[in-house]
Image (cartoon, rainbow, N blue to C red):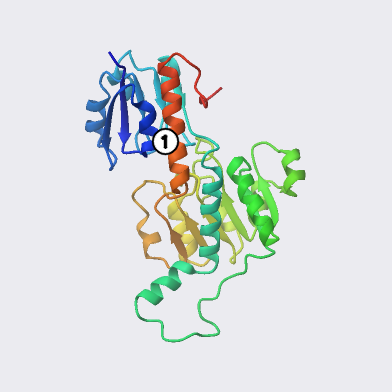
Amino acid sequence: MAEKVLVTREIPEAGLRLLEDFDVTVLFERPPERGELLEAVRGANGILPTVTEKMDAEVMDTAGEGLKVIANMAVGYDNVDVEAARERDIVVTNTPEVLTETTADTTFMLLLAAARRLGEAERLLRSGKWDAWGPKQLLGPDVWGKKLGLVGLGRIGQAVARRSSGFRMEVLYYDQYRNEGVEEELGARYLELDDLLRESDFVSIHTPLTPETRHLISERELGLMQPTSVLVNASRGPVVDEAALADALENKRIFAAGLDVYEEEPKVHSKLLELENVVLAPHIGSASIETRDKMAALAAENLRAVLRGEEPKTPVGE
C-alpha cells in the first residue's frame, strides 16, 4: 500500500508530479482551517505544508506515529515546531537557495517603489485626479549612490547587495556573525545595528524569525533612522513592530516603507492600509513562475527521499 502524503495547499504541478507514487491528498487553494488541517493529517506519513500552516505538536500527534517527514515549501520554517519534530523522529526540510534571486528582485522592487512613491502615483492616476505634470509632484529620494543597510547578510541579503552595485550604493550590514570573505567580495562594511540604522538611507531586512529577532525593529530602532530613510521588509513580518512602523510613517519620522510580509498575515495593521507612504505587497517575494516550480519540486523531492529511506537534499538543522 502506498504511503499517505498530505499536501496542505494547491501547489505547482512540478511538485505534484514527483509524488505520483504515493497516496496523495491535496487540500485547498486557500489556507485550511485548523479543524480541516487536523482532520486531513490523520494517518499521514508525509506532510508538505506551506508557511500558512502551523506544524506543531498537536498536528504531529494527530497524524500519528507513522509521520516521518514535514517538507516545508519555504526557506523559513518558523511555522514548524522543529524541536517537537525532533522529539518524535520526524525529519523537517525546507527549500533554501531556490528562491534567493527572486526574493532579492522583490526586495529591490519594494525599495524602488517606496522611494519613488510608485503606489501613491498609481493610485492618483487611477483615481482620475492626476491633471498635469508638476515640478514638485510626488518627489522622492534617489536610490543611486545612497547607503544601503542590510539587516542580515545571508543568501538573500547578499543577492540584494549584488543588485545594489548597479546603483553604485554603499553597502552596510549587520548580522549575528561577521563574514569578512563576503565583506571583501561585496565591498560591504560591518556595523552594529544601531549605527547601521543611523547611517543608512535604505534599510532592508533579511533575517529569519526567531525569538531574538521578533520586533527587532521597533519604536526605538525606527527612532534612530533618518527622516529621509526607507525601510524594506521581505523576510518575516514579526521582525518589524507594525504598530511602531505605522506611527513612524504617519509622523514622518521615516520617509517610506515597502512591505511584503506582516505580523498577522493576512491581516495588515489598519493604519498601514490608510497611509500613502508605504508600499504593501501580499507576500509575493518568491512569486515567479520558475521559482514556485522549483520550491514545489524541492519540497516534493525532500519528502519523497525520506519516505524512500534516503537522505533529503535540504534538511533543517543539519
Name the foreground residue: 290 vs 92.
290
Q: Residue at x 39, y 71 (%)?
A: 123
How crowded is the residue under tag 1: few (<14 C-alpha within 10 Å), some, or many (20+)? many
Q: Where does the N terminus fall, quadrant-wise?
A: top left
Q: Point out residue 150 in the picture as x, y percentages from the top left corner.
A: 62, 49
Q: Secondary structure at mark 1?
A: helix
Whether residue 82 is visible here, answered yes or no, is no
- Quadrant hosting residue 63: top left
Eyeballing the image, is 253 above or below 45?
Answer: below
Name the foreground residue: 41 vs 289.
289
Find disc 1 in the rendering and name its residue: 296
Q: Point out residue 79 in the picture as x, y percentages from the top left corner.
A: 41, 33
Q: Point out residue 212 in the picture as x, y percentages from the top left corner.
A: 54, 36
Name the foreground residue: 94 vs 78.
94
Q: Where does the C terminus fall, quadrant-wise?
A: top right
Inspect the image, locate mark 1, and give the three-letter code of the amino acid beneath it. Answer: Ala
